[in-house]
Image (cartoon, rainbow, N blue to C red):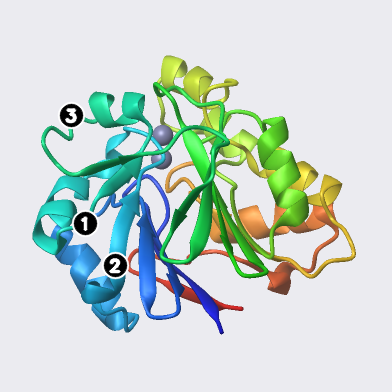
Amino acid sequence: MSVEVHVLASGSDGNCTVVRYEGNALMIDSGLSFRATKSLMAVNGIDERELKGILVTHEHIDHIRSVQVVSKKLNLPIICNQNTFDASHFGDNPHVRISMMNPLGIIGVKVTALPTSHDAVEPCAYFVEAENKKVLVATDMGRVTCQIERALLDADVALVESNYDRDMLETGPYPYLLKRRIDSDKGHLCNITSGEIIKKTITDRRRKIFLAHLSKKNNTPDIARETVSNISGIRRMDLDCLEFKGDTRIIKM
Ligand SMILES: [Zn+2]
Ligand SMILES: [Zn+2]
């Protein structure tokens, strides 16, 4: 029995990941347009009838852009905590409530919401366990919480934020206050911190690391891989990330 992780989009333009297990699938965030989401799913061979729910991490637009449309058109429940549901104005869409650290069973997998530190009402990462395979999707975090650190020790596949390069952010075009927000405890994870937490959680277990939510303005795939590789000791070729707009990835276990 296999678990597949499809990274359909990752970054400020939109985030969308699909975890597939035994003919069923869960979407994590739906930050692209409905059209783009449909077409990338088709490219990746995901039948929309497989989808059984959309998990939402937090209410920022790059994560929720098409959540309501996808929910309506594909008749899917939106799975998230109450605060995120309210802040996202999801209205009368079907809602399955999940609370932090309280696992939810759906489509034969166990889903746990893990608290993250980010400027949203109740942001979280998701840890999905299917049989003995464990997937972590953890982005949009200004610092690494102990729950994320523990999940990183345990994950077989981990999408970890590597949002920005410090120098590029400082010398880049963003206004001063936005730079400070990104660099804060409630902002995003830089390449160095990402490399450090990846290194700290290396064990004997095989683990696939995918660098996620790279900034378009303040990072490049090469710099992210280079920095994380130098710090963590993981070979560059073993650190994957999306390379361009419309790029997708399928990680099979
Ligand atoms: Zn985001
Ligand atoms: Zn965010």
The amino acid marked with disc number 2 is Leu
* Few, some or many residues within 10 Å of mark 2 (<14, 14–19, 20+): many
Q: How far apart are marks 2 and 3 (CA)?
A: 22 Å
Q: In this view, does 50 lie to the left or right of 117?
A: left
Quarter-of-image position of residue 145: top right
Confirm whether residue 139 shows in the render. no
The residue carrying pointer 3 sits among few (fewer than 14), some (14 to 19) or many (20 or more) residues within 10 Å by Cα, namely few
Residue position marked by numbered label 2 in the rendering: 51
Q: In which quarter of the image is residue 82?
A: top left
Q: Indicate if the residue with disc 3 has its beta carbon within 8 Å of ligand 2.
A: no
Which of label 2 and label 3 is nearer to you?
A: 2
Callout 1 touching callout 2 (CB < 8 Å) = yes
**Visible in this render: residue 98?**
yes
Residue at point 61%, 78% (across, down):
253
Q: Mark 3 points at which residue?
A: 89
If the image is split into quadrants, where does the N terminus sit?
Answer: bottom right
Q: Name the residue under label 1.
A: 76
Q: Which of 63 and 192 is in front in this view?
A: 63
